[in-house]
């Protein structure tokens, strides 16, 4: 039996899914390019966006579209900011896209676990599964992006791998916290939308 939380957070129709994907894309546009995000005082939503897309939409086409958008935003940043942003496109850049795909995959696996009634059960258990899924996806994304940057960016010379790990490990908590907050906001938004829709349906048939 599917976890009851899955119905509370999932888009109920194609139109809702399209609107959700558009909002996720808009959040990336607003926060990924640092000139916009600094004005709005917002952190990058990208990690939460890919996790939520895997959890709530799950179509591979959504993943492809969001990856293309991320690349387009980064290319636009280079065009607008010049050489200062060109380091984004080192030989390690594909690792960033793989990291995003890992977040999407974690979301999709979490949705599958919810759909198949994976334990723990109940809505509280479902929330715990989502939290664990986000943690796993964020950890995978952090390791992939940092490992590929260290290995392929050609920016670290003779710096030992353990020294690099020591310098970067402390940043994980910030990335995780940001992804968790944005994911929670997105999920609460979906719960609200579905509750409003359910209330309207009951009113029409009441």
Image (spheres, rainbow, N blue to C red):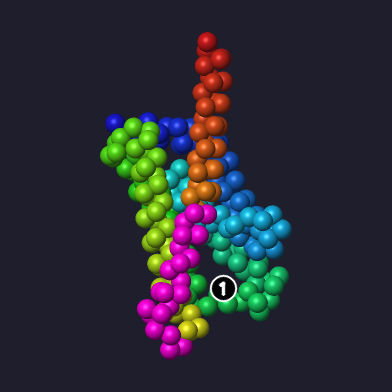
From the viewer's side, name the closer residue of 28 and 12. 28
In the image, 20: left or right of 149?
Answer: right
Residue 35 at x, y = what percent?
Answer: 69, 63
Is residue 106 on the magenta stretch?
no
Which residue was labeled with disc 1? 88
Q: Give the farthest residue toward the bottom.
A: 158
* Whether residue 202 is situated above or below residue 140 in the rendered picture: above
- At horizontal 62% and vertical 63% (from top left) the residue drawn is 73
Relative height, residue 63 to residue 196 (above, below): below
Q: Is residue 118 visible?
A: yes
Give 82 or 157, whichever is nearer the viewer. Answer: 157
Secondary structure at numbered mark 1: helix
| Image: magenta residue range | 157-178
Query: Residue sitting at 46 percent across and 60 percent down?
Result: 173
What percent of the width, then of the height, locates residue 158? 43, 89
* Label 1 neighbour load within 10 Å: few <14, some 14-19, many 20+: some
> What's the residue at 66%, 79% (across, down)?
83
Q: Quadrant of residue 16?
A: top right
Specify whether residue 105 is in view. no
Q: Quadrant of the N terminus?
A: top left
> Is 21 rendered above or below residue 201?
below
The answer to which quarter of the image holds residue 77 is bottom right
Residue at the spot x=43%, y=49% of the render?
Answer: 54
Across and down, in percent, residue 146 comes to 44, 71
Query: At which x and y percent is residue 95?
Result: 45, 69
Q: Tell which residue pokes out farthest to the top in this image.
A: 206
């Amino acid at each position: 039996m599917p976890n009851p939380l899955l119905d509370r957070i999932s888009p109920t129709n194609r139109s809702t899914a399209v609107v959700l994907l558009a909002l996720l894309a808009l959040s990336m546009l607003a926060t990924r390019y640092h000139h916009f995000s600094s004005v709005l005082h917002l952190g990058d939503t990208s990690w939460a966006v890919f996790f939520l897309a895997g959890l709530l939409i799950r179509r591979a086409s959504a993943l492809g579209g969001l990856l293309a958008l991320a690349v387009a935003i980064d290319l636009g940043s280079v065009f607008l900011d010049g050489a200062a942003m060109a380091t984004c496109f080192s030989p390690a850049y594909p690792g960033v896209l793989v990291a995003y795909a890992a977040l999407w995959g974690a979301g999709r696996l979490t949705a599958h676990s919810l759909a198949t009634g994976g334990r723990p059960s109940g809505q509280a258990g479902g929330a715990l599964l989502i939290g664990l899924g986000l943690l796993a996806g964020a950890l995978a994304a952090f390791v992939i992006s940092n490992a590929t940057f260290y290995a392929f960016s050609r920016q670290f010379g003779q710096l030992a791998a353990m020294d690099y790990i020591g310098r970067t490990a402390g940043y994980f908590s910030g990335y995780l916290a940001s992804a968790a907050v944005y994911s929670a906001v997105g999920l609460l938004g979906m719960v609200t939308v579905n509750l409003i829709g359910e209330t309207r349906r009951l009113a029409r048939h009441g």
